[in-house]
Image: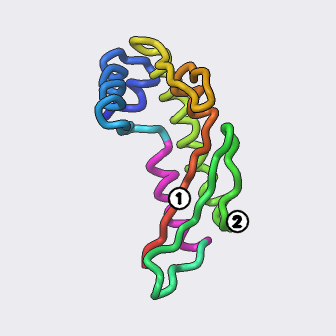
Amino acid sequence: EAKFGELLAADPAALLRVRAALVEYGGFAVSHVPGYDEASSGALRALGACADAPAPSELRRTVAGRTVAGVAEPLDVPACSEPLHRLRAIVASASDVILRAIDAGPGGAPTMGRAGGGEYAGLRALAAAGEELEHFHLYP
């Protein structure tokens, strides 16, 4: 785990912990992201009002969307797009800061091969070329 402020300040120890977690586990946790707690609790409260509740026979109801090349597309339940916009924006902004910090940290930007040849020059380039899927679940 690393605190958002540590990554924003490019704290070498935090960046080394994050790199080690990526290698060992394929992921890491970031805490203390400004505005996240308020945005997530507000978004989850709004989700119950903008999406239909799951039917008794359903395990869950899913509201989904994606971000392609850094552009968030509307969610598949249009009424939920606005209530969840702030949360999606905070996560996108924090992710960009975190990826920039890792790429600029000790050891420099990691390079990763592309399926069709060539390389991604860092995690930020990899994320920018990808498609992010976002899912919000309602349970009965």
Residue 127: quadrant of the picture: top right
Instruction: Please state which of residues 42 and 57 is positioned toward the viewer in this rendering.
Output: 57
Nearer the observer, 103 or 31: 103
Label drawn at residue 78: 2
- Quadrant in the picture for residue 28: top left
Which type of secondary structure does the marked residue at label 2 adopt? Answer: helix
Which quadrant, please, contains the C terminus? bottom left
Q: Is residue 126 magenta?
A: no
Where does label 1 land, which residue?
A: 135
Numbered circle sitting on residue 66:
none
Residue 81: percent from left, percent from top: 66, 59
Distance Cα–Cα, label 1 vs label 2: 14 Å
Please tell me whether residue 121 is drawn above or below residue 4 in the rendered image.
above
Residue range in magenta is: 35-50
Dot 1 falls on a residue whose secondary structure is: strand
Q: Mark 1 or mark 2: which is in front?
A: 1
Residue pictured at 62% horizontal, 60% vertical: 83
Q: Is residue 33 above or below residue 77?
A: above
Name the outermost residue toward the bottom. 56
Viewed as shown, does residue 36 lie left or right of 83?
left
User: Which residue occupies 60% across, 57% down?
Assistant: 84
The image position of residue 85, as x and y in percent, is: 63, 52
Residue placed furthest toward the front: 116
Q: Reading the chain from its start, which is encountered first: label 1 or label 2?
A: 2
Percent coordinates x, y for residue 108 in the rendering: 46, 12
Q: Check disc 1: other Cα within 10 Å, few if <14, some if 14-19, many if 20+.
A: few
Disc 2 residue type (three-letter): Pro
Of the 4 image quadrants, the one containing the N terminus is top left
